[in-house]
Image (cartoon, rainbow, N blue to C red):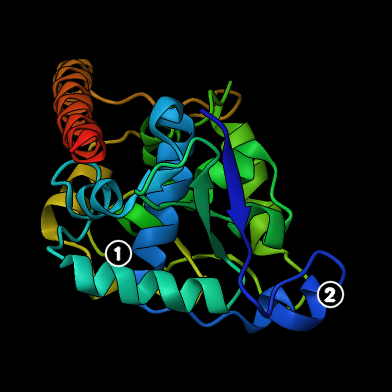
Amino acid sequence: MEYRTIRPAMFSTESADEAIGPASELTLDEVELRLLGSLVEKETTTPEYYPLTLNALCSACNQKSSRHPVVSYSSAEVNAALARLREKGLATEITSSEGSRVARYRHLFLVRLQLNQREAAVLCVLMLRGPQTIGEIRGRSERLFQFSSLDEVEESLALLASEEGRPLVVKLPRAAGTKESRYAHQVGVLVAVDEVPIADIASSSRMQAAPRGRPELQPDLPDQRVTALEQEVNDLKERLTEIERQFEDFRRILE
């Protein structure tokens, strides 16, 4: 199925920078950030369902796995945030060339900020899950980009932190009782350190400091296996939910 982009009235390819303003001036609220992060994620993890319908985007924002905090946005809240993102030139509506009545939406976020795939993966998991250590970022971004080492993650963080005008990530002070520093995104709003649950901090502290010459952080192996199994189950649940949602959309089209 082919889709056609409906651009916001204020957005044009010739004057995008003038219309939207520099990346350093972006101001986004929590709902807009969750929408953008979800669109970026689903574009890579479930490309067969992308661009997303409003219902699918609501489900992506509200899913209980791979999200912090877990939210429960209504379709009205998501729709209003989409309208704001379209006004800012960060999202656009797509219509089907085959006459589907269901509107779909895609982001323009990465084009606007001129990010590559690995930088996008880092920023996406930070937007969706809050502050994280380098090891957590690498593990949680596997479906978005396969980092070969922690050094590669750190290199991407350094590039995002040195963004001209305003950094897109920041290194947070090390919390008491933890061995590693965490990183937070600086897109629109900054997640405060005290907003991170104790469970996340405890998870960070289980990562062992790497000796010199060994950049890889070595997590406890049983925990790693449990986390991998939990992620696999959550991924299957997400795909099943998405298939059910798409079936409902298809059924409505046929009615």
Numbered circle sitting on residue 15 = 2
Q: Nearest the camera: 212 or 224?
A: 224
Q: Nearest the camera: 148 or 75?
A: 75
Q: Is residue 161 above or below residue 120?
A: below
Residue 152 figure quarter: top right
Residue 50 makes an appearance in the image:
yes
Residue occupied by mark 1: 175
- In the picture as drawn, the residue positioned furthest to the right comes out as 14
Residue 201 figure quarter: bottom left
Secondary structure under tag 2 reads loop
Q: Is residue 48 left or right of residue 86?
A: left
Near mark 2 (Cα within 10 A), the count class, few <14, some 14-19 or many ≥20, is few
Secondary structure under tag 1 reads loop
Q: Mark 2 or mark 1, which has the lower sequence index?
A: 2
Q: Residue at x 43, y 34 (%)?
A: 141
Near mark 1 (Cα within 10 A), the count class, few <14, some 14-19 or many ≥20, is some
Residue 180 makes an appearance in the image:
no
Label 1 amino acid?
Ala
Q: Is residue 240 left or right of residue 27?
A: left
Label 2 amino acid?
Ser
The percent position of residue 96, horizontal first and vertical second, equals 50, 41
